[in-house]
Image: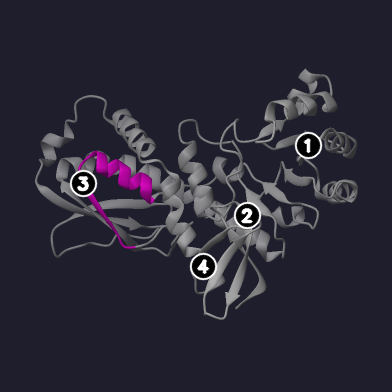
């Protein structure tokens, strides 16, 4: 017999809040709002560990290999003169984290060194909180290949971990207010690097939002102008989306939001609203259309994020999570057997 406790937790991979079920068999289960059940574990916090471990399964191996190959070709499209200096002797290098944050991007790091026939051994799992200086992994392989992959792998890991760290900080601030909605990223990502940054959001506990234009029909202000009004734009979007996609409409006033909801929008984006305008607008809309989800965006930072959290706001999206996240500091140092020098930490 199982009893359900009303404990909420964040499930970044599923993009949903979850309820934790407490079982008389001393197991905990994650039940999503859609009714799915995630694997058992021991506590609300620990119950999310399997989700983090499974996030790499989201990344197709062929895509990882193609990305790693393109990054390596970008860095070395021709002759590698430094290989003559290092030679090809079997070597080992330690990966050090020198700044605090959240570790993210192991699959990309692995893919890069797999392309170079090097082996990576990890000491910390994905999503770990980094307290510098800490040895995160070791890489073994021919010296010239270790150094060929060094900068590419460090760039990818540092950037992905930076996004995850920013996402984790935003989620922590929002949860500190008691708000239980979704912190999300946006499509404001680095060209050619979106998969890494969207993955970093998930590791940090945020929702990735739509991955591309095919993930959600977003009707923005320019679409409304081109279509000749909110109603016409939503009707066109509904025909295009059919049953398989949701329709979200960017609105600049309560009137537009009501028009969008009346026309069949699933979500309304209240963009660039000041907090004192946002919450009464969302409350009025929800009073008439309780099933319409409300997203807030525009001008949201970590410092003012609590002002945007409220009972009628379902999603808060922040472009800064990918646009402005500082990269973490990692280094890869070759070492002789029995000697592993520790580098200095770098604190913000």
Q: In the image, 296: left or right of 333?
A: right
**Which residues make up the magenta segment?**
106-123
Task: Specify which label sits upstream in the sequence, 4 or 2.
Answer: 2
Q: Is residue 48 magenta?
A: no
Q: Which residue is mark 4?
A: 47
Relative image position of residue 223 (x, y in whole percent)? 74, 24
Q: Are marks 2 and 1 in contact (CB under 8 Å)?
A: no
| Whole-percent x, y for residue 13 in the image | 53, 52
Identify the element where label 4 is drawn.
helix
Q: Position of residue 44 (x, y in %)?
A: 56, 70
Which numbered tag is attached to residue 22?
A: none
Q: Residues within 10 Å of mark 3 (few under 14, many from 20)?
A: many
Distance between mark 3 and mark 1 Cα atoms: 50 Å
Tell me the CA gap for discs 3 and 2: 37 Å
Is residue 60 shown left or right of residue 225? left
Residue identified by numbered label 3 = 118
Residue at the spot of label 2 = 16
Q: Quadrant of residue 263?
A: top right
Contact, mark 3 vs mark 2 (Cβ under 8 Å): no
Residue 195, visible in the rendered structure: yes
Q: Secondary structure beneath disc 3?
A: loop
Q: Say which label, 3 or 1, has the lower sequence index.
A: 3
The x, y position of residue 326, in whole percent, is 50, 47
Earlier residue among tags 3 and 2: 2
Category of crowding for the residue at label 2, using alpha-carbon neighbours closer than 10 angstroms: few (below 14), some (14–19), many (at least 20): some
């Amino acid at each position: 017999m199982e009893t359900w406790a009303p404990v909420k937790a964040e499930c970044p991979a599923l993009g949903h809040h979850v309820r934790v079920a407490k079982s008389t068999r001393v197991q905990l289960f994650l039940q999503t709002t859609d009714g799915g059940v995630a694997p058992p574990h021991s506590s609300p916090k620990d119950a999310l560990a399997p989700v983090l471990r499974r996030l790499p399964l989201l990344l197709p191996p062929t895509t990882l290999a193609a990305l790693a190959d393109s990054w390596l070709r970008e860095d070395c499209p021709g002759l590698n003169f430094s290989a003559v200096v290092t030679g090809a002797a079997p070597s080992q290098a330690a990966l050090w984290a020198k700044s605090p944050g959240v570790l993210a991007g192991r699959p990309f790091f692995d893919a890069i060194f797999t392309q170079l026939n090097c082996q990576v051994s990890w000491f910390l799992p994905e999503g770990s909180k980094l307290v510098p200086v800490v040895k995160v992994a070791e890489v073994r392989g021919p010296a010239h290949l270790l150094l060929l992959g060094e900068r590419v792998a460090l760039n990818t890991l540092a950037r992905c971990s930076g996004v995850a760290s920013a996402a984790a900080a935003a989620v922590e601030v929002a949860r500190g207010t008691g708000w239980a909605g979704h912190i999300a990223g946006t499509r404001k990502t680095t060209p050619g690097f979106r998969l890494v940054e969207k993955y970093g959001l998930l590791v940090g506990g945020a929702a990735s939002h739509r991955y591309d234009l095919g993930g959600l029909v977003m009707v923005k202000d320019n679409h409304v102008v081109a279509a000749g009004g909110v109603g016409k734009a939503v009707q066109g979007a509904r025909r295009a989306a059919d049953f398989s996609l949701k329709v979200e409409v960017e609105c600049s006033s309560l009137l537009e939001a009501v028009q969008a909801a009346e026309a069949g929008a699933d979500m309304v984006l209240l963009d660039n609203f000041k907090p004192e305008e946002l919450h009464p607008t969302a409350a009025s809309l929800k009073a008439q259309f309780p099933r319409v989800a409300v997203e807030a965006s525009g001008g949201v930072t970590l410092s003012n994020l609590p002002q945007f959290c409220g009972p009628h706001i379902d999603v808060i999206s922040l472009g800064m999570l990918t646009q402005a996240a500082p990269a973490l500091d990692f280094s890869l140092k070759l070492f002789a057997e029995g000697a592993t020098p520790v580098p200095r930490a770098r604190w913000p």
